[in-house]
Image (tube, helix red, strand yellow):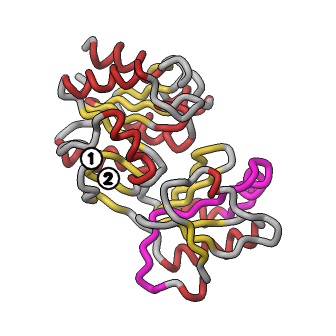
Amino acid sequence: MIKLVAIDLDGTLLNEEKKITTETQTVLKRAKEQGVKVVLCSGRPLLGIAHYLDELGLRESGDFAITYNGGLVQKTDTGKILSEKILTKSDVVSLYALSQELGVPMNFIDLEKVYSPAPPAGKPSLYGNIMKALPFVSVSMAALPDDLKINKAIFCTDQQALDQAIEQIPEFITEKYTIMKSRPFLLEILNKEVDKGKGLQALGRHLGIRADEMMTLGDQENDLAMIRYAGLGVAMGNAIDDVKAAAQFITRTNTEDGVAYAVEKFVLNQ
C-alpha cells in the first residue's frame, strides 16, 4: 500500500508553463485527503517551492518537503529542519578553484541567499535566469567565514560548455561529492551523503514509512536515486532514458498530467 508519494517539480509536476494543472491539483488533494503523504522533492530551496505547496494545500502541520535534492528535509509549515547535509568552507573554496580551472561560473547557496564569486572572464553564471526565490550577493572567496554552512554549489552555464567541463572533472572530486545534473545547463554539487533517495530515507524513518510503501515520480538525473529507492519508481513520459530504465512504470508526460495519471492508477485505486 502506498503511504507516501514524492514528486519532482520541473519536468514532472510542472508543465512547460511551470504550472500545476487543475486536474493534477485535484488528484493530489484527494490523495492527501485519503491520508497519503504528498511530498514535493526538489533541488530548489523551500522558498522556491512555497507557492506550489500553497496551491496543493501542503503547508499544514504534518506536511513535509525534501529540498536541495535531499540535502534538507523540512516541515513545510514552520521550516523546521529534520535532516541536513552541508558543504563546508573548505569544500566551497576547493570547488571554486575547480570551476576556475574548468572555465565555468560557480554559485553556492545557503538557506537565505545565493553567493556569487567572480566568474571566469566573459562567462557569467546563468543561474539568475532560473533562481528567483533567493537574493544574489557578490562575495570574495578570501572573506568567507570559517563557520560557513552551504547547502549546495552549482555550475550554471550553456549546455555545451557545461558538458565539456563535466568531462574534465577529476575522479577524486566525483568520489568526494554527489554531483548531478538537474537541468541540461545546471550541474549541482552536494555533500556526498545527499541525494533524493537519502532524503526520502530520512523522512521515512521520521514517519515510520518504509521504502516499499513509497511511490516516486521524476524525469531527470537528480531523480534517479529516489526512483531506485522507492518500492514504486515512476518515470515521466518525457524522462531521460536512464530514469525510464530505472523505473517500474512509465507514465504520461508532464504536459499530459502524467503525475495525476500515475497517482490515480496506483494510489487512489489501491
Q: Residue furthest right?
A: 122
Residue nearest the viewer, comparing 165 with 146: 146
**Marker disc for residue 203:** 1
Tag 2 and tag 1, C-beta contact below 8 Å: yes
**Dot 1 amino acid type:** Leu
Boundaries of the magenta span: 145-170
The answer to whether any part of residue 1 appears in the image is yes
Question: Which residue is drawn at the image coordinates 32% and 53% (left, top)?
Answer: 73
Q: Which residue is mark 2?
A: 73
Distance from label 2 to label 1 (Cα)? 7 Å
Quadrant of residue 119 within the rendered picture: bottom right
Location of residue 63 in the rendering, given as x and y in whole percent from the top left corner: 24, 42
- Whether residue 143 sits left or right of residue 119 in the image: it is left
Query: How many numbered badges does the structure rendering display?
Result: 2
SS at circle 1: helix
Question: Which residue is drawn at the image coordinates 33% and 38% (left, top)?
Answer: 39
